[in-house]
């Protein structure tokens, strides 16, 4: 997100536009927590994880009163164009500010889940997958040397984008995701076959939103298999931190730039997006459609290559 904030500030300043930053997301907008930003405020931030502006969950934005106060803060700060950065909660707030309060807003899609509709990629996803792979590579060392099965839980409440890419890139033997019915019975049969052939270690990646439950529930079911030693690992918020990957920095810089250019050219009520490799915009409402499922082909490839 810092790379996006940096790009917004510097693109706007390049147009001679003054920039304010809102701290703690919509909470800060409601509370009037607005600061001045200039080129130097975003120096040395592109390599940092998290966000220098901080973030929050903000239930007050679900209330009309909260949204009115947010718009009032913008009016008082003399803001005539707002760039929001985040996932579907942030888009919902942005759309309401645009529709109800006529705030000129452009949204930048950012969530490790990568499931926002209207764009092929969101900020944070690539870094999260790389973090998951690094952890899985380390777990595989114990799996291989101790002859164990590791169940690794990754983020993804509604879709398995991180799970599928992390599983494929780390050579995991199986992946469980919310979008696909869990084939636990056939996996157990496969494990018996592998064990009969002499295989003694496995990595199974589980998206947190899988219908079987998390890694603990799945581990309980697999325990019924004789002679296998199971361990679990929940990666959790480790996936949302750390220095962003090159791909994320490039993406966020492009998105931040495109958001300001959109506002500057008179557009509003849109989200910047990349579709089929092309940087553009889609209406904000598109970002609130059904979440985008993970790639089915890659999902299938995990078990084909196991
Ligand atoms: O929406 C992104 C996400 O990272 C989910 O994958 C995860 O379940 C959730 O956020 C965690 O939210 P919180 O930080 O509020 O616990």
Image: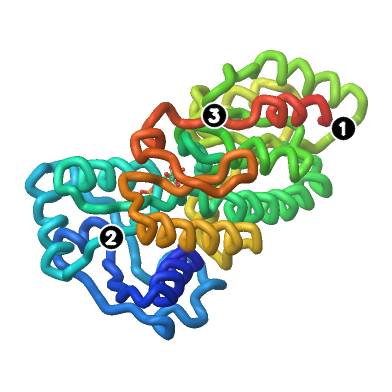
Please give left or right for residue 132 compared with residue 37 in the image: right
Q: Mark 3 = which residue?
A: 293
Q: Residue furthest left?
A: 65
Q: Locate the C terminus by quadrant.
A: top right
Q: Residue at x 15, y 56 (%)?
A: 70
> In this rendering, would 216 be left or right of 194?
left
x, y percent for residue 260: 41, 61
Distance between the Cα atoms at labels 2 and 3?
Answer: 32 Å
- The residue where tag 2 is placed is 81
> Is the residue marked 3 within 8 Å of ligand 1, measured from its CB?
no
Q: Which residue is mark 1?
A: 199
Quote the CA–CA distance across marks 1 and 3: 32 Å
The dot on residue 57 is none
Q: Quadrant of residue 39?
A: bottom left
Q: Position of residue 75 (x, y in %)?
A: 13, 63
Quarter of the view holding residue 71: bottom left
Counting from the top left corner in percent of width and height, residue 122 is at: 52, 48
Q: Indicate how the structure is coloured in the image.
A: rainbow
Q: Could you give the CA–CA distance between mark 1 and mark 2, rounded to whole angstroms?
A: 59 Å
Dot placed on the residue nearer the N-terminal end, 2 or 3: 2
Q: Residue at x 80, y 41 (%)?
A: 147
Q: Residue at x 33, y 74 (%)?
A: 17
Q: Secondary structure beneath disc 1?
A: loop
Tags 2 and 3 touching, CB below 8 Å: no
């Amino acid at each position: 997100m810092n790379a996006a904030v940096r790009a917004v500030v510097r693109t706007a300043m390049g147009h001679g536009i003054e920039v304010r930053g809102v701290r703690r997301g919509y909470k800060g907008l409601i509370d009037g927590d607005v600061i001045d930003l200039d080129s130097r405020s975003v120096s040395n931030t592109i390599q940092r994880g998290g966000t220098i502006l901080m973030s929050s969950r903000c239930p007050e934005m679900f209330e009309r009163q909260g949204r009115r106060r947010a718009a009032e803060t913008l009016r008082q700060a003399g803001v005539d164009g707002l760039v929001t950065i985040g996932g579907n909660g942030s888009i919902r707030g942005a759309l309401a500010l645009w529709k109800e309060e006529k705030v000129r807003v452009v949204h930048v899609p950012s969530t490790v889940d990568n499931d926002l509709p209207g764009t092929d990629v969101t900020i944070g996803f690539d870094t999260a997958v790389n973090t998951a792979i690094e952890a899985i590579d380390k777990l595989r060392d114990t799996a291989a040397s101790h002859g164990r099965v590791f169940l690794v839980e990754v983020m993804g409440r509604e879709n398995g984008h991180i799970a599928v890419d992390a599983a494929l890139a780390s050579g995991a033997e199986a992946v469980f995701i919310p979008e696909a019915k869990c084939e636990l019975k056939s996996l157990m049969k496969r494990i018996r076959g592998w064990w009969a052939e002499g295989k003694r270690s496995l990595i199974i990646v589980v998206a947190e939103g899988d219908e079987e439950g998390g890694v603990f529930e799945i581990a309980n079911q697999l325990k019924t298999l004789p002679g296998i030693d199971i361990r679990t690992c929940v990666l959790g918020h480790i996936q949302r931190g750390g220095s962003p990957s090159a791909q994320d920095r490039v993406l966020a810089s492009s998105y931040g730039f495109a958001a300001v250019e959109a506002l500057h050219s008179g557009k509003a009520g849109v989200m910047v997006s990349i579709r089929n490799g092309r940087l553009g915009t889609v209406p904000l409402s598109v970002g609130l459609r059904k979440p985008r499922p993970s790639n089915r082909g890659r999902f299938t490839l995990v078990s084909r290559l196991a």
